[in-house]
Image (spheres, rainbow, N blue to C red):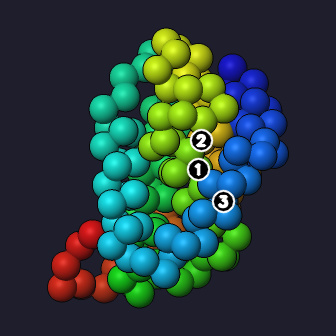
């Protein structure tokens, strides 16, 4: 099941609509307030989503980890991530929070399935970046910050 989602996500990642989201992602990196709003919207969507599909909780957990990674990148405490991973990940978050994408979210089941598929592909393609960040978090190397996003 998860491999099917990954393959579907790969196809979605090559779609012209998703490529536009990746292009837009570059504009978010230089605008912390705008990026913070995106992270909040994506986080809210991830925690409000209830699904009994196999593998969803794992994909959700990794995407929440990616949101923490971006927050750490913005506040300067974590920089060991490639720009490509950041841009593609932010593109996935933009796709996730936008209701009108390849399969609009208001279409029952199918609308959410394309979001899940794209997240599954991201998790599979960028697991090394996510693993590195989790190891960094586990080592307690988080620097105290004056605020959070």
CB-based contact (under 8 Å), mark 2 and mark 1:
yes
Q: In this view, does 82 lie above or below 12?
A: below
Q: Is mark 1 on a helix, strand or loop?
A: helix
- Which one is earlier in the sequence, the residue at label 1 or at label 3? 3
Callout in the foreground (2, 3): 3
The residue where tag 2 is placed is: 119
- Give the CA distance from mark 2 to mark 3: 14 Å
The residue where tag 3 is placed is: 22
The picture quadrant where one finds residue 77 is bottom left
Q: Please tell me which residue lies in front, 89 or 24.
A: 24
Q: What element carries label 2?
A: helix
Residue found at x 33% / y 60%: 37
The residue where tag 1 is placed is: 92
Q: Is residue 148 above or below residue 108?
A: below
Rendering coords of residue 136 (x, y %): 47, 74
Callout in the foreground (2, 1): 1
Q: Which quarter of the figure is the N terminus placed in?
A: top right
């Amino acid at each position: 099941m998860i491999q099917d989602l990954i393959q579907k996500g790969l196809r979605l990642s090559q779609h012209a609509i998703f490529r536009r989201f990746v292009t837009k992602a570059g504009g978010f990196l230089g605008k912390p307030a705008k990026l913070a709003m995106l992270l909040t919207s994506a986080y809210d969507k991830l925690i409000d989503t209830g699904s009994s599909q196999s593998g969803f909780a794992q994909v959700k957990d990794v995407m929440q980890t990616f949101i923490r990674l971006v927050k750490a990148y913005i506040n300067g405490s974590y920089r060991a991530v490639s720009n490509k991973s950041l841009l593609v990940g932010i593109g996935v978050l933009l796709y996730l929070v936008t209701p009108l994408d390849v399969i609009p979210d208001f279409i029952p089941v199918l609308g959410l399935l394309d979001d899940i598929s794209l997240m599954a592909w991201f998790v599979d393609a960028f697991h090394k970046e996510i693993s590195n960040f989790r190891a960094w978090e586990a080592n307690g190397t988080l620097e105290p910050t004056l605020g959070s996003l």
